[in-house]
DNA sequence: CTTTGTGATTGTTACGTTTTAATCAGGGGG
DNA sequence: CCCCCTGATTAAAACGTAACAATCACAAAG
């Protein structure tokens, strides 16, 4: 009953050999127009669809790429994913999405799935600094491009935005606003973005003639709105609320904003608040959020273009490390 | 150089036959403890990972499911996707995500990819009412479960939230607030959710002793924040702004809110505004948004459980059509 | 009439796994 | 000592496709 139609069935029906059908599928220019048209119409008639697994098995590689992100609930990553998907589907590739939720174990499981599926390449925003797993993938012939993460080596492609500059811009802006005490609300220390933005923040402190050690750091286990709100509660309970707060991403900032407003703290009158990423919702919040904008969609596009170039032209491919620059977007949440 | 290690290599090294290695992988209880342990350690030693395509080819089905959503940029769908992914990975399945962006062509291309990959099943929030493509998938032995879409037939599983009730609750709430004129800001007419919420809205009008035809409909080509803002501009330009607006989802509502506030319209004093979905950002907006909450994450979980049950126990599986009920969440944007 | 060349098509093999039936070893009962 | 049973292991045959060398048809050139 549930008969699946194969390349052989098409061949028999069209009166050609299976090889010819395969050629129609993969190198149509090699086959005479008349037979090509006949085969194509037979394919439609029988409702044949290529068996991707058989194809992958024989060809040695698939037409899929894996994308591993830290938090698919963060609009920053959905924007990146949109860029990835657009380029991938333009070039006939499918995207397998893996969400690590910041858990190393889940990230590893996702990479295992990618390896089992023999994806052509992997795009990953690594959740920590261990390059071992990625080298392992490369050892299996799977190309890897780092997304939103600068390359520590030159034998790989990477696309990133300068987070040190971004952190510096954020804190410089807060200092411009006349902030006395400053706080940095961040996520897990293993996340590089958090570290780099902090480095930038400290540089701006120093440049502004302040002691970087004055920067009060509040580290949360996640970078979500809920965590931001908890950070607000913590600061309020401790009575240690600074004049100005730099949050490592917009979700933290939006949660922080909610927490502060609920407690009757006025933004920006009592506290200045700046986020990071400039997600779509930053401009729609209660007090619209000053933030650091990144070319998010572009990040996904460029990373995928580099990846597919490396896959398709391994001989001529030159590894590139691309670094975009962020922008400051001033809104209501800062003085 | 780039040698990929196969089941045969493991077998040779461990001094057993390939069949035994396969058994260790798939039916470990069938093999003696001593050999099982030896094989397992050889697998680790050689860094063997199973070739998913070969496995799929031979077994006739894969360990992946396809998820096709209308807009991955909408937090509603990322919440659903989170539920799907959690259940899938608990049961050893990988998820291939397809984003149709509301385009029928893209949806079709995604379904083709799913078919080529021989996914075990498909979870889909269809972007229109044509069941033909889905029956085609079923004819190929691929189970299909509808997500956020009620079943029109009893021979399939479906998980949905009652949108008629939701629409009715929204408009009843606006009428309670004393609204005179009412507007419904919606997306493309082919999207069922838009239609159902409108039906509910009209029912509430009638129940409130109003003529349902009084409901001013503004249909936008997309259900994004940008479209919502354009809707605001359109209403303002026409001078046809009603007392109260019901937006078919929160993104439209947030865009509408932005558009109104920029034009100096006060919410809720001049206009009451209610959204739909109760996404995380609804409570964080300039004026926090009254909305209709849905059990989003649960939707994804339950749908996936039904799908995998259907795949794994086709004999005993009983199709279910599950309908959740929405909740009204009142915040500042309505009187 | 034969040879050569060219473009189109075919036959065959291999990819890495799962699965079934067949084989094997060893022990207990007759 | 033989037979049968059980549990563990193996050998071999697919699964559907891509790739490559081999073949074919046919026309142009000699």
Image: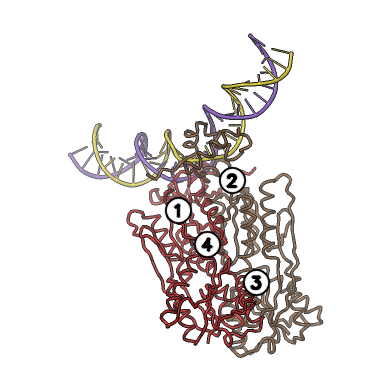
Chain colours: A brown, B red, C purple, D yellow
Towards the viewer: B127 or B242? B242
Query: Cα distance, mark 4 to mark 2?
Result: 27 Å
Q: Chain of mark 2?
A: A
Q: Position of residue A238 (x, y in %)?
A: 62, 88
| Percent x, y of residue C28 | 24, 45
Residue at image mark 2: A61
Question: Marks 3 and 1, Cα distance to the nearest angstrom?
Answer: 38 Å
- Residue drawn 58% across the image and 43% down it: A60
Label number found at residue B69: 4
**How far is the residue under mark 1 from the one under mark 4?**
18 Å
Q: Residue at x 50, y 42 (%)?
A: A44
> SS of the residue at dot 2?
loop
Q: Earlier in the sequence, mark 2 or mark 3?
A: 2
Vertical relation: B124 (above or below) B33: below
Front of the two marks 1 and 4: 1
Tag 2 and tag 1 share a subunit? no
Chain ID at mark 4: B
Q: Quadrant of residue A331?
A: bottom right
Tell me the CA gap for discs 3 and 4.
21 Å
Q: Nearer the viewer, mark 3 or mark 4?
A: 4
Q: Which residue in the protein does label 1 denote?
A: B132
Q: Do the residues indicated by labels 3 and 4 lie within the same chain of the protein?
A: no
Please say if the residues under marks 3 and 4 sit with CB atoms less than 8 Å apart: no
Q: Chain of mark 1?
A: B
């Amino acid at each position: 009953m549930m008969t699946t139609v194969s390349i052989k069935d098409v061949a028999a029906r069209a009166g050609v050999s299976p090889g010819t059908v395969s050629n129609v599928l993969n190198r149509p220019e090699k086959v005479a127009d008349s037979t090509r048209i006949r085969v194509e119409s037979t394919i439609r008639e029988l409702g044949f669809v290529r068996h991707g697994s058989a194809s992958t098995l024989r060809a040695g590689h698939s037409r899929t790429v894996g994308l591993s992100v830290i938090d698919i609930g963060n609009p920053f990553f959905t924007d990146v994913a949109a860029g990835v998907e657009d380029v991938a589907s333009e070039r006939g590739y499918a995207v397998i999405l893996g969400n690590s939720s910041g858990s190393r174990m889940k990230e590893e499981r996702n990479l295992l799935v990618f390896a089992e599926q023999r994806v052509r390449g992997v795009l990953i925003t690594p959740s920590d600094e261990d390059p071992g797993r990625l080298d392992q993938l490369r050892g299996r012939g799977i190309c890897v491009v780092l997304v939103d993460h600068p390359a520590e080596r030159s034998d790989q492609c990477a696309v990133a935005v300068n987070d040190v500059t971004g952190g510096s811009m954020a804190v410089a802006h807060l200092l411009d606003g006349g902030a006395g005490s400053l706080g940095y609300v961040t996520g897990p220390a293993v996340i590089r973005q958090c570290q780099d933005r902090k480095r930038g923040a400290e540089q701006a402190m120093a440049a502004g003639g302040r002691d970087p050690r004055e920067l009060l750091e509040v580290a949360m286990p996640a970078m979500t709105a809920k965590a931001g709100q908890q950070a607000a509660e913590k600061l309020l309970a401790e009575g240690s609320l600074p004049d100005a707060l730099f949050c490592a991403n917009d979700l933290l900032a939006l949660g922080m904003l909610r927490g502060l407003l609920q407690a009757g703290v006025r933004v920006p009158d009592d506290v200045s608040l700046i986020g990071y990423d400039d997600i779509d919702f930053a401009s729609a919040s209660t007090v619209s959020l000053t933030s650091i904008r990144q070319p998010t969609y572009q990040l996904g596009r460029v990373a995928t273009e580099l990846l597919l170039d490396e896959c398709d032209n391994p001989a001529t491919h030159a590894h590139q490390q691309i670094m975009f620059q962020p922008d400051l977007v001033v809104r209501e949440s800062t003085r």
